[in-house]
Image (spheres, rainbow, N blue to C red):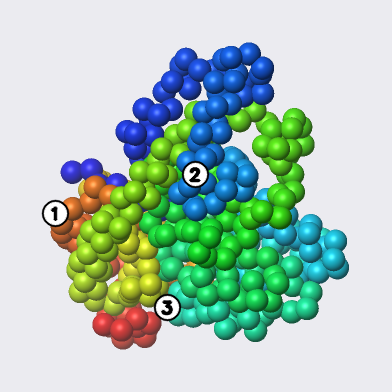
Amino acid sequence: MYLYADNAATTKMSRTAIEAMLPFLDGVYGNPSSLHSCGQKAKEALEDARDRIARCLNASPREITFTSGGSESDNQAILTAAALGAKKGKRHVVSTAFEHHAVLHTLKKLERQGFAVTLLDVAPNGLVTPEQAAAAIREDTCLVTVMAANNEIGTVQPIVEIGAVCREKGVLFHTDAVQAAGHLPLDAAAQHFDLLSLSAHKFHGPKGCGVLFARRGVTPERLIEGGAQERGRRAGTENVAAAVGMAAALEEAVRDMAPTAARLTALRDRLIDGLRRIPYSALNGDRSARLPGNVNFCFEGIEGESLLLLLDDKGIAASSGSACTSGSLDPSHVLLAIGRPHEVAHGSLRLSLGEDADEAQIDYLIRAVSETVAYLRGMSPLWHDLENGRRPHVLAR
Ligand SMILES: *Cc1c(COP(=O)(O)O)cnc(C)c1O
């Protein structure tokens, strides 16, 4: 059995998206800026993709800018709001401690330029509140940026309420909706966000392609200098095939959203119930305010990396919050932000389900994870100390 349970890292492209792209990889290769008909065909396809993506977000096509992905969109959204703020002498930004690094590292950059940043504390259930956001907004706040759903623990933030607070206080609101797109409703007319980031490869589209939504009146600040593509907001020859694939994938995800979410939520809860039976384990993040396919657990007395490698041998692709794989010994900033101690945060496992998951796969996951955790604990001196009472347990049995 091969079971890909790492859909929060990236997803398999949908057949529909691949087929939509093929004509633009093979036949219609023109540059959308060229005036001949081959170029103009590419231009038409690009604008059609923009229209369709705008419709999925209940936005206007003029509010859609194509980017290279979620990271670029996050950078551009934040730097745009900061530049607009600086013009009015407003140099304060509100965010949260568990954002994606594309947000956190951009905020660090702003701090080096003299901006002040307030990071809201995240509660142990992985949520921030609109009241926290309201209390953090100051006279000189130019931006609030809060992710719609967390990429590690899957918790879904109250972005509708936070957006309403921002609108009332006249502060720009950005949301990194990379994990939410295709899973949760995003509606530019009904919800208040000024800037929003999407990434195609998180909803079965191609990698290296994303969207920055910027509400009418908020003009994205150029990050890349060059030609006048994207109405001067993003230089560089457009990736036409990717934009077309992204539009097809987003339409498909949005069309099937409600039934898919219902089915995945049931499977997710079955997986949570199964893994909870492992002694000294704990679910990370709120049980219900979470993405339909996200399960994230801590297991005491084990290393996340060892668990991942043994699961890989059993044909399971998963992810761990601890960051040894990414070249750092620090455990996940997300798990630390929700108050998990270092030693527990190292033993975390994220399983993010795909639309093709079924009950047999869930039961296989539960069995494989339970056996592997028991096996690793059997070999762990740390676990023996915990069992013999030489060290106190951190998690409840
Ligand atoms: C994946 C991800 C990103 C980065 O998107 P890329 O397209 O890979 O650059 C940003 N934010 C969140 C929440 C993500 O999950």
Q: CA distance from mark 3 to mark 1?
A: 29 Å
Q: CA distance from mark 3 to mark 2?
A: 33 Å
Task: Report the quarter where the C terminus lies.
Answer: bottom left
Q: How many marks?
A: 3
Q: Residues within 10 Å of mark 2 (few under 14, many from 20)?
A: many
Q: Amino acid at mark 2?
A: Ile
Q: Residues within 10 Å of mark 3 (few under 14, many from 20)?
A: some
Where 285 sits versus 294, above or below? below
Pointer 3 with pointer 1, Cβ within 8 A: no
Which element type, helix, strand or loop, lies under badge 1?
A: helix
At horizontal 63% and vertical 81% (from top left) the residue drawn is 134
Where, by quadrant of the figure, is residue 293 drawn?
bottom left
* Badge nearest the viewer, 2 or 1: 2
Specify which label sits upstream in the sequence, 3 or 2: 2
Left or right: 225 in relation to 251: right
At horizontal 63% and vertical 44% (from top left) the residue drawn is 62
Where, by quadrant of the figure, is residue 234 drawn?
top right
Q: Amino acid at mark 1?
A: Ala
Can you identify the residue that label 3 sits on?
125
Can you identify the residue that label 2 sits on?
53
Residue 29 image position (x, y, % from top left): 54, 18
Task: Report the quarter where the N terminus lies.
Answer: top left
Residue 119 image position (x, y, % from top left): 64, 73
Left or right: 202 in relation to 273: right
Specify which label sits upstream in the sequence, 3 or 1: 3
Specify which label sits upstream in the sequence, 2 or 1: 2
Can you identify the residue that label 1 sits on?
360
At horizontal 55% and vertical 27% (from top left) the residue drawn is 44
Left or right: 224 in relation to 334: right
Which element type, helix, strand or loop, lies under badge 2?
A: helix
Residue 86 image position (x, y, % from top left): 83, 62
